[in-house]
Image (spheres, rainbow, N blue to C red):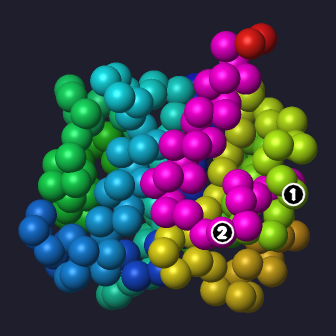
Amino acid sequence: MPPGYRRVFVLHSNTGVTAPLFSEDTLATRGGRMDVVARSLISALWDTNSPRRDTLFVAVLHGPPNPPLALYVRSSEIFTRRPGEKDVASMILSALRGEKRAAALRKEGTLEVVRALKDEGFRVYLLVEDGEDVGRVGLDCSRSAFVLGDHIGFPQELLARLRRECDVALSLGRKPYLASHCIAYVHEILDRAGSST
């Protein structure tokens, strides 16, 4: 786990492909809804105008041909401006080809990523609709990791294991929201908490 991060977002992608099988124009189709990954990455690593240098984004890809594959991305060395989905698609393609230094690939599943984060001292929150209400839980602003599903969610067996492994099951609301919106909302909560300390 790269050092120096206070926030980590882990996205479980059920269908994101694990080889460069798509183009910048087909990330939603041939990429296995890699557009969900791209939007989540942008929300995690950028605010409106600048990179969030204290944040790491991990997408755990479970699509063909060789799942699982964890893509670790940091903002500080990738983009000089806020990227769009096609920019992110190009970066992911480069990483899947082994060309990009700012993104690291590891043969890990979601549980392995969670365990590594806990070993590094992160408090790990599982974002699910039926978790504890975020308004009643004091979030750790120092070293926090948030695990969330894509548009499909988590497979039931994995979800049961994540509930045991993560420190807290946390709810942002009883309705499902887009992964990218969940990430932006968590950032906003932590930003407010950090500015008041």
Mark 1 vs mark 2, CA separation in Å: 14 Å
Using the rendered image of the protein, determine whether residue 107 is visible from the camera's viewpoint: no
Which secondary structure, mark 2?
loop
Q: Quadrant of residue 155?
A: bottom right
Foreground: disc 1 or disc 2: 2
Image x and y of residue 139, in percent: 80, 37
Circle nearer the N terminus (1, 2)? 1
Q: Is residue 73 left or right of residue 195?
A: left
Relative to 141, say whether 34 is above or below.
Answer: below
Q: Which residue is mark 1?
A: 132
Image x and y of residue 192, in percent: 66, 23
Amino acid identity at mark 2: Lys
Image x and y of residue 180, in percent: 46, 54
Using the rendered image of the protein, determine whether residue 57 is visible from the camera's viewpoint: yes
Q: Residue 72 or 144: which is nearer the viewer? A: 144
Residue found at x 62% / y 42%: 186
Q: Is residue 140 left or right of residue 52?
A: right
Image x and y of residue 99, in percent: 19, 52
Q: Which residues are magenta?
A: 166-195
Residue found at x 34% / y 87%: 64
Q: Quadrant of residue 109?
A: bottom right
Q: Is residue 22 left or right of residue 170?
A: left
Amino acid identity at mark 1: Glu
64 inside magenta stretch: no
Counting the numbered discs, the total is: 2
Q: Which residue is mark 2?
A: 175
Quadrant for the N terminus in the image: top right
Q: Residue 171 or 95: which is nearer the viewer? A: 171
181 inside magenta stretch: yes
Quadrant for the C terminus in the image: top right
